[in-house]
Image (tube, rainbow, N blue to C red):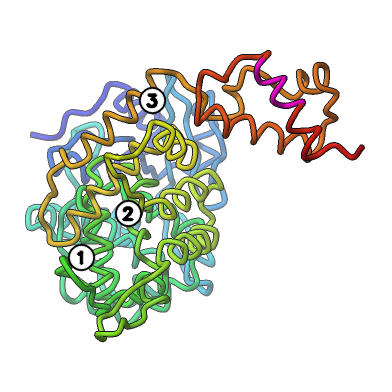
């Protein structure tokens, strides 16, 4: 008995078969069906050429027509459909130099990267087509390259990182010959664009245990080529309660972020990345890492910029890394709690708490008591509930008011006045009244900043 497929796929198949063409489901959807999981999308392959597909369907986008791929818009959904093809030559180590269409599905499947991605389902019957043994490798939990693994990796260096990604997201192992070829072909990753590497890393960071991926990258030589700063932590021991070197601690902290949040997991991965670069010894010869949070933030910014991460992600990660060494004492005043929130941002304190717990877990592989932060959390929630001023926006006076009421012109001096007012209100929220602030602004500007 074959797989049951959605009605839309059968209707697309009927249109193609009515014109004398075959149509198969291919790619990740087939792998998901074999593994008993729900497919995320549906990619198709056919012996019809792209122009025939465009003729048969009313709404078609030529997304990759140069390589035989178009996208069908069908009943409100999109379906990528590619003509069976043979690829020839990979002079740039990434894309084929030439594509030749073929009537043979088996030839098309042979060009793919791994056996688990080289299966197809005949849509009419729902029967599996598996010439490379992908179903057995799925059952065994193995990522295996098709044919000669070195040839596959030399054709496209991105396959090196894809092997790691499939292993960690599917919880598979990499077959030994394939893993060995990854080591000998690791330089191929240097020919891949930063944007594509970034995309693979983001998928890895959504996995249940991303540490496995970074361990595999270290074993195969990919880590030192993609993230040499992280690789530098291998073997760098730490004092005190730490059981692990900096590298192992970092990747375990990444696991310690339970939610599949790539940005927060990047912060965990990079929070101590600066340690090998600031390491020194104290009087007793113990290795110490003074100022590592600043160096880690600097390196995180450089790495994420190099890999073309969005500016918003870079800003968030760098800020969390820089602030991850925060401390709290119950003797703090409410004003001190407010200053903490101003420094780290109201939107970031919960992420910093999660990062602290992940950091603690990664010290010994044991979860710290989450109640250790309850006192600080309660203080923060109290301050937030009181809706005291925590930013310039929350002051009951603004720049236009300062000009109209106090004759303070726009410019750097006005900015200093506003900062002065915020600092005063942080100490005493009762001062946050328009008339009071205006009088304070006049006095401060006249005594400290007025040119006259």
Identify the image quadrant of residue 189: bottom left
**Residue at image point 83% right, 17% down:** 404
Compute the Cα span from label 1 to label 3: 55 Å
* Label 2 neighbour load within 10 Å: few <14, some 14-19, many 20+: many
At numbered mark 2, what does the secondary structure look like: helix, strand or loop? helix
Local packing at callout 3 (Cα closer than 10 Å; few below 14, some 14-19, many 20+) is some
- How far from the left and from the top, in percent, is residue 210? 25, 55
In front: label 1 or label 2: 2
Residue at the spot of label 3 = 383
Q: Which residue matches tag 1?
A: 144
Name the residue at 55% across, 39% down. 51
Would you call the spot at circle 1 few (<14 residues within 10 Å), some (14-19), or many (20 or more)? many
Q: Which residue carries the number 2 mark? A: 268
In the rendered structure, which disc, 1 or 2, sits on the residue that comes first in sequence?
1
With 205 as the anchor, is 101 left or right in this view?
right
- Tell me what residue is drawn at x 59 percent, y 31 percent: 422
Q: Is 53 above or below relative to 142? A: above
- Frontmost of labels 3 and 2 is 3
Q: List x then y, in percent, for residue 354.
A: 27, 43
């Amino acid at each position: 008995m074959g797989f049951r497929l959605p009605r839309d796929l059968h209707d697309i198949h009927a249109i193609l078969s009515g014109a004398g063409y075959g149509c198969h489901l291919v790619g990740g959807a087939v792998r998901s069906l074999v593994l008993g999981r729900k497919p995320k999308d549906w990619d198709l392959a056919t012996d019809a050429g792209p122009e025939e597909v465009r003729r048969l369907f009313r709404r078609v986008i030529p997304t990759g027509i140069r390589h035989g791929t178009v996208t069908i818009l069908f009943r409100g959904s999109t379906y990528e459909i590619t003509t069976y093809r043979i690829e020839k030559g990979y002079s740039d180590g990434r894309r084929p130099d030439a594509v030749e269409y073929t009537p043979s599905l088996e030839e098309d499947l042979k060009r793919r990267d791994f056996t688990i991605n080289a299966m197809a389902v005949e849509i009419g019957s729902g029967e599996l087509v598996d010439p490379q043994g992908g179903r057995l490798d799925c059952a065994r939990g193995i990522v295996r390259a098709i044919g000669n693994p070195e040839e596959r990796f030399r054709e496209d260096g991105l396959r090196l990182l894809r092997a790691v990604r499939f292993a960690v997201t599917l919880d598979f192992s990499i077959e030994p010959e394939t893993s060995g070829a990854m080591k000998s072909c690791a330089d191929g990753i240097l020919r891949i664009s930063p944007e594509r590497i970034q995309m693979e890393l983001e998928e890895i960071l959504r996995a249940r245990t991303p540490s496995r991926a970074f361990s595999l990258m270290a074993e195969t030589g990919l880590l030192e080529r993609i993230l040499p700063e992280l690789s530098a932590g291998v073997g760098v021991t730490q004092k005190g309660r730490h059981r692990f070197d900096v590298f192992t601690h970092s990747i375990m902290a990444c696991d310690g972020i339970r939610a599949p949040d790539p940005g927060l997991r990047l912060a965990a991965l990079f929070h101590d990345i600066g340690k090998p670069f600031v390491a020194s010894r104290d009087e007793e010869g113990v290795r110490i890492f003074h100022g590592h949070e600043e160096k880690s933030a600097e390196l995180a910014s450089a790495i994420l910029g190099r890999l073309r991460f969005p500016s918003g992600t870079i800003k968030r990660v760098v800020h969390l890394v820089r602030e991850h060494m925060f401390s709290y004492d119950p003797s703090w005043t409410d004003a001190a709690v407010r200053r903490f929130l101003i420094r780290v941002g109201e939107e970031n304190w919960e992420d910093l708490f999660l990062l602290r717990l992940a950091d603690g877990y990664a010290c010994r592989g044991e979860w710290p008591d989450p109640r250790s932060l309850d006192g600080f959390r309660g203080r923060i929630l109290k301050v937030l509930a009181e809706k005291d001023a925590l930013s310039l926006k929350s002051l009951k006076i603004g720049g236009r008011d300062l000009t109209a009421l106090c004759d303070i012109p726009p410019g750097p001096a006005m900015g200093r006045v506003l900062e002065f007012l915020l600092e005063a209100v942080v100490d005493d929220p009762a001062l946050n009244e328009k008339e009071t602030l205006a009088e304070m602004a006049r006095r401060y500007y006249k005594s400290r900043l007025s040119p006259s």
